[in-house]
Image: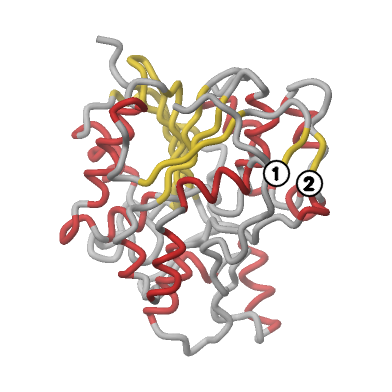
Amino acid sequence: MKKARISLVAIVTALIGLAGCDSSNQTESSTQTTAAMDSMAEVTEPSQVSQAPSSSDLADILAAQPEAVIARYAFRNPQQTLEFFGIQPGMTVVEALPGGGWYSKLLIPYLGDEGELVGANYPTGMYKLFGYNEERMAKLATWSTDWPATAQTWVEGNAAQVSGFVMGDLADSEKGTADAVLLIRAMHNLARFEEEHGYMSQALKDTFDVLKPGGIVGIVQHAAPSDSDDAWANGSKGYLKQTFVIEQMQAAGFEYVAASDVNANPLDLPGADDVVWRLPPTLSGSKDDEEQAAAMKAIGESNRMTLKFVKPAI
């Protein structure tokens, strides 16, 4: 991984942002485009740059975040999640599909100036499947430098270095350099397009290659009911079965370590016609229906598996 700090630059405009879905009669195509980007928040404006706490204590970092971020802790449980994965200051951590940086803005100060955060974006070709036009595709060509430059502006003070790469384009010099890889709500689209394009296989190969022996993979993923139809739980609705994820990781060479229910939500009971983006914060299909939106908010964010894997030390 590159260890030279990236100079602060103006935030890159229109960083593969995406408008949310707000129509109950939206097409599946538009739903799936939002699906691809459900973890991509708006890019932070310069006035929102935060000062890293004087210590790298995770609790202090979490407490220093904006109210809108803190409001999601009840569903995303970042402290318990990162502790379960064993993320520590000074590590080199790869974050898949970091987007607007919900987790990045926690990791950059937590990893500290001895650590590094590496963003890993979806393969560029996948965005064509989401309906990206030529202009948007052109912007993606420089994502591996644009995103780190933007992310480096999010936190001042005791902040980790930031770099990036695109899945399927991992440089030899980056192999064996990471202590951990985080796949947080990032696997469903990889699985969805695996049969025709092999995106999940390539992403998991990069994950294996980028890690040091003994390195950790932490997964948080929308969890399909165990008795759901396999065709429904193929990722296109946002959900995957836990057994499927474990099988894919083991087939890629990883050893299963443990599961946690820290991000479980038993109120999320999707039916055959449901997609994960019906729930907050997206509220697809109910933003103009107060009663339906209230019902979705009462459920909360999705039921999520939280799984830990390790790359064998030998």
| Mark 2 surroundings: few (<14), some (14-19) or many (≥20) residues within 10 A | some
Residue picked out by circle 2: 49
Give the image location of residue 300, x and y in percent: 63, 59
User: Which quadrant is home to the N terminus?
Assistant: top left
Q: Which amino acid does label 2 sit on?
A: Val
Residue picked out by circle 1: 153
Q: Which element is circle 2 on?
A: loop
Please tell me which residue is depicted at 80% across the width and 42% down the height of the picture: 50
The answer to whether 19 appears left or right of 209 in the picture is right
| Mark 1 surroundings: few (<14), some (14-19) or many (≥20) residues within 10 A | many
Q: Are marks 1 and 2 in contact (CB under 8 Å)?
A: yes
Please tell me which residue is depicted at 31% across the width and 33% down the height of the picture: 171
Furthest residue in direction left, as rendered: 196
In the displayed structure, would residue 187 be above or below residue 117? below
Give the image location of residue 11, x and y in percent: 66, 55
Residue nearer the viewer, 58 or 234: 58
